[in-house]
Image: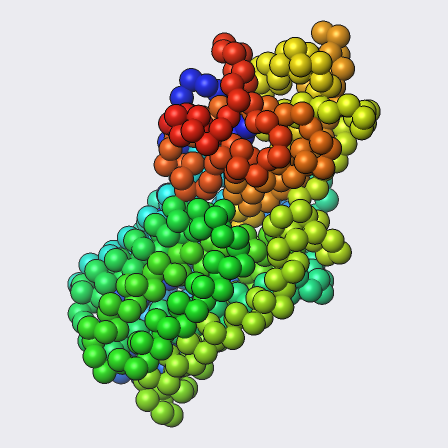
């Protein structure tokens, strides 16, 4: 979670004011996220130039994704032992070498093999890039997350465009282009990214596989496998019936990528906040199934295929974001372990799909693989439904049994259950102290005890989730607040809220906690995030205000506390939490 509850009132902090280390990794992220879409525009050219069938060319996806999947099981253990920076550097170097080798190859089998090596480098990179960006960020990690998401969207959107432009010159162009750009990123990473501390204890290499014994994580992982089967069937085979040049294919998939990025970053969290994770995923998977069936039925009409592929970008953007959210909500294990287990199943589905699609296309006709893709999207719905109860419980209350999200851990003495308290929600931010002090004055004026709830920060982007603050740091922050208040004669209690999801999810969790303890009011501060960021990942205070049973108060060291309502929230939209 970001620091939304405890922010400065002086306006939004720009996410682009980051140290060179963050910019170096963000640049590498753009190139890495280009990796899949980059080759789409050159698939027909590769088949023609190397006298290969579409099913042979599809192995470029299969080798890349299957190796990525298997590597996801061990990269967490590797990184915990050798350090995040070293893992990142090795991943970048592997990508540079194998992308360049793919560009020099004269056979489809050679390119398939080198793409496998590329997949290994990709796994090492994506497993650590978010953690490195967050650890290297200054002035709060919220801006760094926005920058990471921007890099993701830019890479998805620009990859096909660059692949089309370079592929129009030669099919070798995209491979050499990636090698050069990643080499620049490698030099920048070596120069600007500092050595980062390793975890206190290394991760077991079998931890991701053991994590799949948990029903919630396995259910969401299988759902992701089925979704990615359909997704990569489309990505691997849609270019052929379009009958376009490399440049034209680049433009089509750029339009597709823009929709993926926009709906992933801007619209998915809003739909999730309004309707819930599972209902949105049900509708989205059904929409994807319909789009794939349209492609299958209209496979002989290039216009139908082009329009359907572009439209699918909206559904894919939503699914990419919410599937990861669903996994992290129900996963009863550490975030990196859950990410690795989920990534393994997700990429296995993506890797097997192009191979099977190629076999089906060779044996029947080009429409059959798309019908199978439509069926896998549809099959993912009952699989998701089998875990609906776990997901719903985790999303609303933390649930029972396997689900452990969110959780509240007391710090210091427990609150007096007989006296309604004022709860102040804060995060790890330089102004958290003044927000807590302002809330303490409000509690004193109303004759109420004060409870400090510190939201432990977690970032979830695409298939990656990282705890940006460990529990001991969160506990220390609460203890510091309590000690400072005690020195001024203010009795207070504290809690650490461990949550996952967007800002709105944390707001709902605090509202539920306030209801459970029959709080008199919840006090919050202003956010440094601008309106666009709040639209993208939800507003902590909006969700809190709309779901809390008690009064929600905006406390500001320089102003009189204000009760927040729907109308006042609209008035404060440019600076609300």
Residue toward you, 299 or 489: 489
In the rendered structure, the answer to whether residue 254 lies left or right of residue 98 reads left
Residue 508 in view, yes or no: yes
494 versus 370 height, above or below: above
213 versus 520 height, above or below: below
In the rendered structure, the answer to whether residue 97 lies left or right of residue 545 reads left
Q: Give the image location of residue 415, x and y in percent.
A: 79, 26
**Residue name at image x 18 percent, y 65 percent:** 248
Q: Give the image location of residue 572, x and y in percent.
A: 41, 25
Q: Quadrant of residue 520?
A: top right
**Residue name at image x 76 percent, y 28 percent:** 411
241 versus 88 height, above or below: below
Residue toward you, 179 or 429: 429
Q: Quadrant of the N terminus?
A: top right
Residue toward you, 530 or 213: 530
328 versus 108 height, above or below: above
Q: Give the image location of residue 291, x and y in percent.
A: 34, 71
- Looking at the image, the residue that sits furthest to the top is 488
């Amino acid at each position: 979670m970001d620091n939304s509850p405890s922010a400065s009132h002086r306006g939004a902090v720009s996410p682009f004011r980051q140290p060179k280390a963050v910019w170096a990794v963000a640049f590498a992220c753009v190139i890495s996220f280009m990796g899949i879409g980059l080759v789409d525009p050159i698939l027909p050219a590769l088949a023609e130039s190397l006298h290969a069938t579409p099913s042979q060319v599809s192995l470029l996806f299969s080798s890349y994704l299957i190796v990525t999947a298997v590597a996801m099981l061990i990269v967490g253990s590797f990184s915990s032992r050798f350090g995040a920076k070293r893992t990142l550097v090795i991943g970048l170097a592997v990508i540079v070498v194998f992308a360049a080798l793919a560009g020099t190859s004269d056979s489809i089998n050679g390119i398939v093999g080198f793409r496998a090596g590329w997949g290994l480098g990709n796994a090492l990179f994506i497993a650590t890039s978010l953690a490195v960006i967050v650890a290297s960020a200054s002035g709060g990690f919220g801006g760094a997350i926005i920058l990471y998401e921007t890099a993701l969207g830019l890479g998805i959107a620009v990859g096909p465009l660059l692949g089309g432009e370079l592929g129009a010159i030669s099919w070798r162009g995209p491979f050499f282009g990636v090698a050069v750009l990643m080499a620049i990123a490698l030099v920048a990473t070596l120069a600007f990214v500092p050595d980062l501390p390793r975890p206190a204890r290394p991760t077991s290499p079998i931890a991701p596989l053991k994590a799949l014994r948990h029903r919630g994580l396995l259910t969401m992982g299988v759902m992701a496998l089925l979704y990615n089967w359909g997704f990569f069937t489309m990505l691997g085979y849609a270019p052929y019936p379009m009958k376009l040049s490399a440049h034209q294919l680049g433009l089509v998939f750029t339009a597709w990528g823009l929709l993926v990025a926009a709906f992933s970053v801007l619209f998915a969290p809003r739909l999730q906040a309004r309707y819930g994770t599972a209902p949105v995923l049900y509708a989205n998977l059904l929409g994807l199934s319909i789009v794939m069936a349209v492609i299958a039925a209209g496979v002989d009409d290039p216009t139908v295929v082009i329009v359907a592929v572009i439209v699918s970008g909206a559904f894919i953007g939503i699914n990419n974001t919410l599937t990861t959210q669903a996994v992290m909500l129900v996963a009863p294990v550490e975030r990196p372990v859950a990410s690795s287990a989920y990534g393994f199943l997700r990429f296995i589905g993506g890797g097997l799909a192009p191979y099977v699609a190629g076999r089906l296309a060779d044996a029947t006709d080009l429409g059959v693989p798309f019908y199978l893709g439509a069926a896998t999207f549809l099959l993912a719905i009952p699989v998701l439904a089998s875990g609906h109860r776990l997901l719903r419980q985790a999303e609303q209350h933390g649930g029972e049994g396997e689900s452990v999200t969110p959780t509240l851990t007391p710090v210091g003495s427990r609150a007096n259950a007989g006296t309604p308290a004022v709860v102040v929600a804060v995060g790890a931010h330089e102004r958290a102290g003044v927000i807590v002090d302002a809330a303490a004055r409000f509690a004193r004026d109303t004759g109420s005890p004060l409870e400090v709830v510190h939201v432990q920060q977690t970032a979830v982007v695409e298939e990656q989730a990282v705890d940006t603050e460990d529990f001991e740091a969160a506990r220390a922050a609460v203890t510091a607040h309590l000690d400072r208040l005690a020195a001024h004669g203010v009795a207070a209690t504290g809690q650490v809220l461990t949550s996952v999801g967007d800002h709105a999810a944390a707001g709902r969790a605090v509202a539920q906690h306030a209801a459970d303890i029959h709080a008199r009011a919840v006090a919050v501060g202003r956010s440094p995030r601008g309106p666009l960021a709040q639209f993208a990942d939800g507003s902590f205070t909006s969700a809190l205000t709309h779901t809390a049973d008690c009064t929600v108060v905006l406390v500001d060291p320089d102003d009189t506390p204000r009760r927040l309502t729907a109308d006042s929230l609209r008035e404060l939209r440019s600076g609300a939490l």
